[in-house]
Image (cartoon, coloured by chain):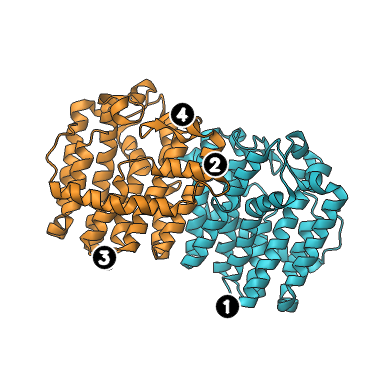
Chain colours: A orange, B cyan
Amino acid sequence: MNARVDLPLAFADWMAARQAVLEPLLERLLPPGSEAPARLHQAMRYAVLGGGKRVRPLLAYAAGEAVGAAGERLDRCAAAIELMHCYSLIHDDLPCMDDDVLRRGRPTAHVEFDEATALLAGDALQCLAFDVLCQAGADPAAIILLARASGSRGMAGGQAIDLESIGGELPLAQLELMHRMKTGALIRAAVLLGASCGAPLEASQRAAFEHYADAVGLAFQIVDDILDAEATTQALGKTAGKDAAHNKPNYVAALGLAGAKARAAELRDHAHAALAPFAHRAARLRNLAELIIVRSS
Amino acid sequence: MNARVDLPLAFADWMAARQAVLEPLLERLLPPGSEAPARLHQAMRYAVLGGGKRVRPLLAYAAGEAVGAAGERLDRCAAAIELMHCYSLIHDDLPCMDDDVLRRGRPTAHVEFDEATALLAGDALQCLAFDVLCQAGADPAAIILLARASGSRGMAGGQAIDLESIGGELPLAQLELMHRMKTGALIRAAVLLGASCGAPLEASQRAAFEHYADAVGLAFQIVDDILDAEATTQALGKTAGKDAAHNKPNYVAALGLAGAKARAAELRDHAHAALAPFAHRAARLRNLAELIIVRSS
């Protein structure tokens, strides 16, 4: 993947503007690090406020804006998705899971604090994600969407399959299912929850968002596998080369580097095609599909 | 505490009737153990369906019925509370937390399965609790109530203070705060969420429920400390004597056995007094306050 790509300047400005709203909002939504239990609150803040690409909230913003959403409700929806994502990162990094020491270029939460604090910080961030989504005026269907994207039939289930598969082999269809659950489900939720902040969706719009989200979700994971094989730990901000080192089923092993890159590009094209009904209003979703493919970390 | 106490036969029948609805509902709400990822789903079922006193769902039922609630909505609300409680038990028992091997008379989830599976089962049960509460037609205020009762300012925060306090000393006020967060917050949520399934509460009714819940929540924890000191591991179905063995601040250490028992009885009386506005409609809440005091496990 090549980080030097021509993404429009307007897109960079748009991302910066959304992040300039999101970062202080996340900061305000998290309990102060001085509030008891201080160590727990500090760990929650450490895990959320330590950078990150904010891809999922940006997807929520772009989907919402494609159907006319804006303002506080969309902001909180984007923040809720990021809180859920950050909880999953903390737990995935724990010694009994992926046992990783580096995340977003810094020590993982359990290294910086301790395992118990990291575990509880993840637990509490999951609660906070639902809390914040409710503050966004989400209806029960939206809460259920986030809950199922994150639960045993979504993100947590995908991580379970991932752990079970270490050292074994997964047929490509199983590998794809695992990633649709582990990474894809929350990306899909980000798009659909963002879109739910606008005018009620027609069935064809919802289907278009779903096709787009499924394509970028899978592309995101394939690019993750490519970066794991190609990039350095320093560039990634997390440990590189883990799939090969742990003999984890992945797309580079399944398709080869060139095959994986071709598949990612194909999925980007699917994502673009799915957005046709939104015409120019989906420009940011198109940009994000491109960014997901060309990112270098 | 003495398990041989005269609780009305009608109360025992009432409990059995509610449990006869709750157990098969929990069974249906959990993904089948045959569904992939099978090990994860089996661990979720193991942790939830393995017995337990179901005190929190019973409190939800009793509070709901005191204000005329009944039916599927109340059932699902009770189930959601129990799912949240079961997630917290799995995580509390993990090696990096209380490191316990026995729960409800059986090996803890991470012993029966493995740490990663137990961690993910807890994560997924938390999601499922929010999912099921939404299925109960809960409004955003109810979801936020459950989220805050479970998060860093509630249950997870209480557990963090508990872990921090090991080997140290907590002034009685701090010990009480810890338990109000760790145990009391979810008990309070059980009562208020059950009550939210009935007719809209008047402010005085809500205050009465809150006083009742705060009293039984604290009494529950004091009795836990008494049982930890007095009962056998076999009778408890979980490891006894842990507070003393780990030098954990607790009510028996703080007040002595007799003092702790007197405080529990006093709180039971407070709970009964709080229920005055509901007259005979609060009979089951009174019975539950009694049960919480006299239980032997």
Tell me if residue B191 comes above or below residue A124 in the rendering: below
For the point 12% across and 58% down, which residue is it?
Answer: A279
Q: Residues within 10 Å of mark 1 (few under 14, many from 20)?
A: few
Tag 1 and tag 3 share a subunit: no
Earlier-in-chain disc, 2 versus 3: 2
Secondary structure beneath disc 3?
loop
Mark 4 vs mark 1, foreground winner is 4
Mark 4 vs mark 3, foreground winner is 4
Earlier-in-chain disc, 2 versus 4: 2
Q: Which of the chains bears the disc numbered 1?
A: B
Q: What residue type is labelled 1?
A: Ala
Q: Which of the chains bears the disc numbered 3?
A: A
| Direction from residue A26 to residue B290 in the image, left or right | right
Q: What residue type is labelled 4?
A: Asp
Q: Which amino acid does label 2 sit on?
A: Arg
Where does residue A11 sit, x and y in percent of width and height? 17, 49
Where does residue B49 sit, x and y in percent of width and height? 62, 49
Q: Residues within 10 Å of mark 2 (few under 14, many from 20)?
A: many
Residue at which label 4 appears: A99
Tag 2 and tag 3 share a subunit: yes
Q: Which of B136 and B272 is in front in this view?
A: B272
Q: Which of the chains bears the disc numbered 2?
A: A
**Residue B199, labelled with which disc?**
1
Q: Answer with the quarter of the image where residue A93 lies.
A: top left
**Residue A201, labelled with which disc?**
3
Q: Which of the chains bears the disc numbered 4?
A: A
**Residue A39, labelled with which disc?**
2
For the point 31% across and 45% down, which residue is it?
Answer: A54
